[in-house]
Amino acid sequence: MYTGKLVFSQLTEHLPLPAFRQCVTRYRGNHKIKSFSCLDQFLSMMFAQLTYRESLRDIETTLRAHSSKLYHMGIRGGISRNTLASANQVRDWRIYADFTSTLIQIARDLYSNEKLALDLEQTVYAFDSSTIDLCLSVFPWAPFRRTKAGIKLHTLLDLRGNIPSFIAISDAKLNDVKALDLLTIEPGAFYIMDRAYLDFERLYRFQLAGAFFVIRAKSNTKMRRLHSRPVDKTTGLRCDQTVSLTVVNTALRYPQHLRRIKFIDPATNKELVFLTNNFALSAFTITELYRNRWYVELFFKWIKQHLRIKAFFGTTENAVKSQIWIAISTYVLVAIVKKRLNINESLYSLLQVLSLTLFERVHINQLLNHVPDKYTDPENAKQLNLFD
């Protein structure tokens, strides 16, 4: 294992810096900037994500304590709380959004041959949103309810590698179903959604685009059974039917037949009813597809627990969005490193090892200095195989 590089540098050397500079140029991020560049801001904020810093003062104190090592971390400008706060407030958040999109494309290419839990050749996406609550008096630009503010993170997760292929940040008032209008539908792909996205006019767009959807039906959805197919009830299936919509308005919005599958979850004894426009896969495969939707829930849960997207270093809309996009780019970067170094560890487990072992339990001097000798012991190989 090479110990001549800082741990942080070994991660960031996988960043496509030419693409980052293009994003900066596109939005004139370094216009009239003399010392603290957009790259300095990005690396400082990424460091804060990986080490779970609590505030701008915490970032400043931690990095200034090791000022002699900043150059080797790629940070050329001086670290100051006011400078970093100003950068978060002024530098266009679209720089980091576009760069995250570049990282996502790299990661998706790397994971394109990953096997799904199900034997499917098509791309499978899970689409959902998560609300990040904010204080209304501190973030008045994001009103949600009478006494609180909030924003929504809409995410389309590619289940090959659990890479977010599409992310949009909106105000929390935006109805979930309207987020479907933001998607570019990929022909042949599967889109798995919960019943909050049940809008037949919007779902018909998937049918016209040649894509497939699997979605839970609402209890008040009116349908007429046309014919049924036999099912193996020992698997939890109860029926597999071809149906048509009976309400005039919904029938006009979705004029074609749908497939209705009823399933009793053996673990919870809960009855679930699914609607899909795919008639080729087995009914049980459809239910297993929907089960994989929980990966997007796991994604939201993990980033909220281990990245800084619930407490923010700035109060402006630009600062909040910049922090969220840098957090997501950190997640994707670790996914890229995992794949390039062929690490046999789940992405969530690897990120947890990074955040809890390397960056919290290890003293900051060991983090910013060379990799400590004790980690070269074979017994600790699991913790350091990322840097072998």
Image (tube, rainbow, N blue to C red):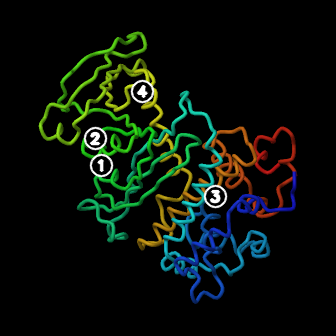
Residue type marked 2:
Leu
Identify the mark nearer the N-term, 2 or 1. 1
Q: CA distance from mark 1 to mark 4?
A: 22 Å
Q: Residue 198, labelled with which disc? A: 2
Q: Residue 378, labelled with which disc? A: none
> Which element type, helix, strand or loop, lies under badge 3?
helix
Identify the mark nearer the N-term, 3 or 1. 3
Q: Is residue 253 left or right of residue 313?
A: left
Question: Circles 2 and 4: CB distance less than 8 Å?
Answer: no
> Which element type, helix, strand or loop, lies under badge 1?
helix
Residue type marked 3:
Leu
> Which element type, helix, strand or loop, lies under badge 4?
helix
Residue bearing the label numbered 1: 177
Q: CA distance from mark 3 to mark 1?
A: 33 Å
Give above or below for 234 relative to 86: above
Identify the mark nearer the N-term, 4 or 3. 3
Residue 55 position in % (x across, y down): 55, 68
Residue bearing the label numbered 3: 50
Q: Residues within 10 Å of mark 1 (few under 14, many from 20)?
A: some
Question: Circles 1 and 4: CB distance less than 8 Å?
Answer: no
Give above or below for 229 relative to 81: above
Q: Is residue 166 left or right of residue 376?
A: left
Residue type marked 1:
Val
> Which element type, helix, strand or loop, lies under badge 2?
loop
Q: For residue 81, which quarter of the picture?
A: bottom right
Question: Circles 2 and 1: CB distance less than 8 Å?
Answer: yes
Q: For residue 39, which quarter of the picture?
A: bottom right
Front-lying residue, 263 or 345:
263
Q: CA distance from mark 2 to mark 4?
A: 17 Å
Residue bearing the label numbered 4: 286
Residue type marked 4:
Ile
